[in-house]
Amino acid sequence: MVIARIAVLAVVGLATAAVALPHLVAAQPAAPAPQPVGMPVGLDDVPTRQVRPPRTLVRPPVKPVLALEADHLPKLAPYSLPPRLVLRARAQPDAPKRALERRVLRSSHLALSPAARRAVRQHKVAPGALTLLLRTPRLGSPLLVFSARGRSLEVQATRMWMTRKTLIALDALPTRGRPASLRLRPVSNGSTDVRARHGGMLGPQAVAIAKRYLGIPYVWGGATPTGGFDCSGLTMYVYRQLGISLDHYAAWQFLEGERIAPEQLQPGDLVFFHPQADGPGHVGIYVGDGKMLHAPHTGDVVRISSIQGRSGYLGAVRPY
């Protein structure tokens, strides 16, 4: 009887377990789905970041560079075209002539005329002249070589500012490398050569040009040979012919160049006198030996005067 009762209880227990098991399994919370490695569990767990579209760079329009035109050249100067430079080189007997000839003929910054090219090929140009051609600066366009024979050259730049750069470059050469002589030959009808002693460059050329106007009457506000000159009109007119722009006012010209000490004065430097509230009231061109060329005052003419002992000296400027 006892064994039969135990057997009945066991059967009842198994039946109860079979009925309750599905309900217990359904009551358990579902296991979370596996997440990929490195991914966040939820969007709330990571900070949000707005994705901005890439910026479009807006570049300012490029302004076209204005080329130098003929009307940029001085209008009042007698040189309507850049002047030709008539050079005479120094002797260089030991220079390698054949190598210099090849370099000149192949140079991209020299444009030789047929006559000049023929003279170089026939070995008729001195080494000093060949060296001088190669030492001219490389500018926007080739330097025109009209003639070359022996130690003599005749060249021309195609713009006034190129002429100025060429003169400055030649002036910067060592003394033995500079031209033995130099003069400007204006390309205009009825004009005469401008000569400077001792092969001077910009400064002496300015003095040589200014001497052409000795005796022109002083006229306040004047800035031409036909209309007369005042002091700053004379200096402005002279340097304009060399491609250097100055304002028509002595006090402003005092600020348009490099200040020069009295012991460093050279021909062509501008010397200033007569202090006023806004600066110097008078300007002249230093010609050397303690003298200047200037337009003094009403009733006088362009003349050369001594600056020794002259009162009111304020200083000097080299405008190139």
Image (cartoon, helix red, strand yellow):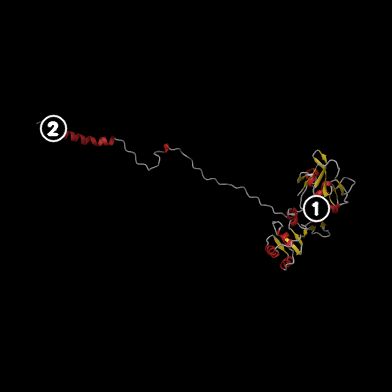
**Residue 22 pos. (x, y %):** 25, 37
Residue on which the image places disc 2? 6
**Residue 122 pos. (x, y %):** 72, 68
Q: Residue at 80%, 53% (x, y): give it.
A: 204
**Label 1 residue SS:** helix
Q: In this view, does 230 lie to the left or right of 179?
A: right
**Residue 91 pos. (x, y %):** 76, 61
Specify the farthest residue to the front.
94
Specify the farthest residue to the left.
1
Q: Earlier in the sequence, mark 1 or mark 2?
A: 2
Residue on which the image places disc 1? 204
- In the image shown, does 193 or 199 lie closer to the viewer? 199
Tally the marks: 2
In the figure, residue 115 lies in which quadrant?
bottom right
Q: Distance between the residues labelled 1 and 2?
A: 141 Å
Q: Is residue 301 left or right of residue 95?
A: right
Which amino acid type is marked by label 1?
Pro
Dot 1 crowding, Cα within 10 Å, few <14, some 14–19, many 20+: many
Q: Nearer the viewer, mark 1 or mark 2?
A: 1
The numbered dot on residue 166 is none
Q: In this view, does 9 lie to the left or right of 95?
A: left
